[in-house]
């Protein structure tokens, strides 16, 4: 028997472009359930704080984990974090040789060998994790399971690689991670509230509810618990709740939940997000959703091509679905309407059928998404049957089908993005320009460029460096303190001197997205010079690179380098042409506004480029600046430009 408590650390790394969604619900369930099994005296389970998990770069993450010196390290693996999580685990094990690593989540599937056989993994758990995790801990502390240093567990154990546990027959045995104090919620984060673990449908491209069976039974959480979790969040200032449920309006809990929320949330403090089945949205159901302040819903058309619907085993009554979806829009509820390209047996004619359906049914805006051939899904098992080729690493995008080769798929995606009003060159899932508090905030934000000599967070302050001006003072040990997204400001004249320093940062933080702002005072560098400089920097392909695959003319190697992104900050008088830098760097014009001068909005638009860095000459007072910035922000928002 262990004389000291087993130290366990659970980690969930965020969606790169939206850390606010990174509520580690799975980790909270694991902790709450294990402690309810009487393990509290023999096991200490911690969850890596979100201030670290959501913000830290790779080197800082490794250090934060090593500092906590766990005996067992657990990762929740999803498409967006699995590669990064496993690389972090590998680095941690190099420094903590006796550490054991357990992984679970949707990425752990029998057919996903790159995860199961990763050298950092000691134990891989398929399916629901609560029982398996608690059993694993019990066997370790009772010395009934010895996990060898090479990562191979005792194959006679009830917990081992490839072995699934049956789903819990009754979810009431799983304590709430919120009500038990197992989870923290940051002020601007989204609260995830799970309703059930069940889906009656068998869409071949989806993992949801795969091992749950066709009947709901007790595979849902009770009304009192769900309401208590929402109330818990409201008391802590939560403004957004995402119901983790694929078919909310099909559950018996739907009507009493909506009635209770309309009372509890009468002040409409909380906005709810839900996934619904459009065929079952009566006028009364939509009214109940609106009264509860369900503001955003996902109804998931995917395709209206009957051939493709049959191929993916998706049962949709299109006429009833359209009627329900229109009711949502009429009630002022925002609808996420998705169309998936690359489905089995779909083709250009079938996609046109889907778009005609959307138009004929007056369904409003839609977005285009590419099929992800996810591990564990039927569509992956049937890939050869339908001629599907796809990435072998996340996000597992389809690269061609028997009816849509890559070139046609890519062309169709571009056309449909343009038709739907989206930038076809934008990469879904890529982090936007730096948020509030750094050099660039995003479209229409009026953020400030950092001044020379800007101070960095002190070592040990608990803050991670998200913005740095190279060659300023006090930058020792920066590599190990970088955030997951970093703005680097650099005079272009010092480009060569910066190469080795930036290369070291990239090696230490391969998953960090670096936005490098090259400030030009005289003649700008040529596109080939910048392209060559970027190519000489080290690079390990990862998730962000594979997101951008459709920017490439060919499906191989299946990715396009994402980092560093280069931004060329040019004087307004420069004669450079932004299009000359296409695919290499985005041009930002630095414009100084003289006292009393009007904004040259027409000239800005004609000049092209990604945006404007606006500065004010002497003579402007605060009131005048505010008026000018308001006008500039409106212009930037209208034309999709960045404003510094």
Image: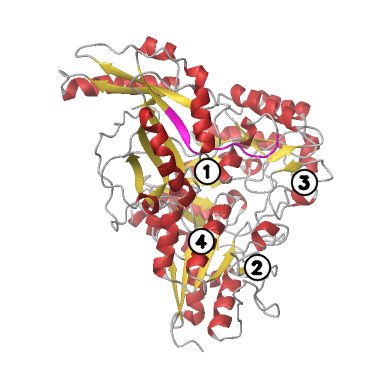
**Residue occupied by mark 2:** 167
**Observer-nearest residue: 483 or 426?**
483
- Residues under numbered marks 3 and 2 in contact, where contact means CB atoms less than 8 Å apart: no
Q: Give coordinates of residue 373: x percent, y percent.
A: 70, 46
Instruction: Verify whether residue 621 appears in magenta.
Output: no
At horizontal 45% and vertical 36% (from top left) the residue drawn is 432
Name the residue beneath numbered marker 4: 91
Q: Residue furthest right?
A: 385
Q: Earlier in the sequence, mark 4 or mark 1?
A: 4
Name the side, left or right, on which 387 lies relative to 623: right
Earlier along the polypeptide chain: callout 2 or callout 4?
A: 4
Q: Position of residue 556 (x, y in %)?
A: 70, 37
In this view, 426 is above or below 183: above
Report if the CB atoms under discs 4 and 1 are less than 8 Å apart.
no
Q: Earlier in the sequence, mark 4 or mark 3?
A: 4
Mark 1 or mark 2: name the one nearer the start of the chain: 2
Q: Nearer the viewer, mark 1 or mark 2?
A: 1
* Relative side of 464 to 535, left or right: left
Q: Please, what is the dominant secondary structure of the magenta stretch?
A: loop
| Residue occupied by mark 3 | 313
Q: Which is more foreground, mark 2 or mark 4?
A: 4
Instruction: Tell how many labels.
Output: 4
Question: Regarding mark 4 in the picture, which secondary structure is present there?
Answer: helix
Mark nearer the viewer, 4 or 1: 1
**C-alpha separation, residue under disc 4 versus residue under disc 3:** 42 Å
Percent coordinates x, y for residue 615 in the rendering: 26, 22
């Amino acid at each position: 028997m262990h004389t000291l408590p087993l130290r366990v650390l659970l980690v969930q790394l965020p969606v790169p472009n939206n850390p606010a969604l990174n509520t580690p619900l799975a980790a909270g369930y694991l902790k709450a359930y294990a402690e309810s099994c009487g393990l509290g005296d023999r096991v200490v389970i911690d969850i890596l704080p979100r201030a670290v998990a959501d913000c830290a770069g790779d080197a800082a993450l490794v250090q934060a984990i090593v500092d906590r010196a766990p005996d067992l390290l657990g990762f929740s693996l999803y498409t967006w974090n699995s590669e990064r999580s496993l690389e972090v685990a590998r680095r941690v094990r190099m420094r903590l040789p006796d550490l054991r690593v357990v992984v679970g989540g949707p990425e752990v599937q029998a057919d996903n060998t790159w995860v199961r056989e990763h050298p950092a993994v000691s134990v891989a758990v398929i399916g629901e994790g609560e029982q398996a995790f608690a059993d694993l801990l019990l066997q370790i502390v009772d010395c009934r399971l010895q996990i060898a240093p090479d990562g191979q567990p005792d194959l006679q154990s009830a917990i081992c690689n490839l072995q699934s546990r049956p789903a819990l027959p009754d979810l009431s045995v799983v304590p709430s991670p919120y009500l038990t104090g197992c989870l923290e919620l940051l002020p601007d984060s989204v609260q995830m509230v799970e309703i059930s673990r069940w889906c009656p449908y068998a869409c071949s491209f989806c993992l949801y509810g795969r091992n749950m069976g066709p009947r709901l039974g007790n595979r849902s959480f009770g009304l009192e618990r769900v309401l208590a979790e929402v109330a818990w969040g409201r008391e802590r200032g939560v403004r957004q709740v995402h119901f983790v449920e694929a078919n909310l309006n099909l559950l018996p809990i739907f009507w009493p939940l909506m009635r209770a929320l309309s009372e509890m949330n009468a002040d409409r403090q909380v906005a709810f997000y839900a996934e619904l089945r459009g065929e079952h949205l009566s006028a009364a159901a939509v009214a109940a959703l609106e009264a509860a302040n369900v503001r955003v819903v996902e109804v998931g058309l995917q395709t209206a091509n009957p051939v493709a619907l049959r191929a993916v085993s998706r049962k949709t009554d299109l006429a009833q679905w359209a009627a329900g979806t229109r009711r949502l829009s009429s009630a002022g509820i925002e609808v996420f309407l998705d169309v998936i390209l690359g489905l089995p047996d779909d083709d250009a004619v079938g996609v046109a059928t889907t778009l005609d359906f959307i138009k004929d049914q007056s369904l409003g805006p839609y977005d285009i998404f590419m099929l992800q051939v996810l591990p564990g899904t039927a569509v992956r098992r049937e890939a050869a049957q339908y001629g599907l080729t796809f990435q072998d690493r996340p996000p597992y995008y389809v690269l061609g089908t028997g009816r849509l080769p890559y070139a046609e798929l890519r062309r169709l995606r571009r056309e449909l993005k343009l038709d739907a009003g989206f930038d076809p060159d934008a990469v879904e899932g890529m982090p936007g320009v730096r948020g509030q508090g750094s050099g660039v905030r995003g479209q229409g934000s009026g953020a400030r460029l950092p001044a020379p000599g800007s101070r960095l967070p002190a070592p040990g302050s608990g803050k991670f460096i998200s913005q740095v001006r190279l060659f300023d003072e006090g930058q020792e040990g920066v590599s190990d303190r970088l955030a997951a997204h970093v703005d680097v400001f650099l005079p272009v004249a010092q480009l060569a001197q910066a190469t080795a320093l930036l290369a070291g940062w990239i090696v230490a933080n391969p998953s960090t997205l670096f936005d490098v702002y090259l400030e030009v005072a005289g003649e700008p560098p040529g596109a080939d010079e910048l392209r060559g400089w970027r190519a000489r920097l080290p690079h390990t392909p990862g998730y962000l690179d594979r997101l951008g695959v459709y920017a490439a003319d060919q499906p191989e190697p299946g990715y396009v380098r994402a980092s560093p992104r280069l931004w060329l900050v040019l004087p307004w008088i420069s004669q450079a042409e932004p299009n000359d830098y296409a695919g290499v760097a985005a041009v930002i014009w630095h414009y100084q506004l003289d006292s009393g001068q009007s904004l040259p909005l027409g000239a800005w638009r004609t000049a092209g480029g990604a945006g404007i860095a606006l500065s004010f000459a002497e003579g402007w007072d605060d009131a005048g600046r505010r008026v000018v910035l308001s006008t500039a922000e409106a212009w930037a928002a209208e034309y999709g430009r960045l404003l510094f």
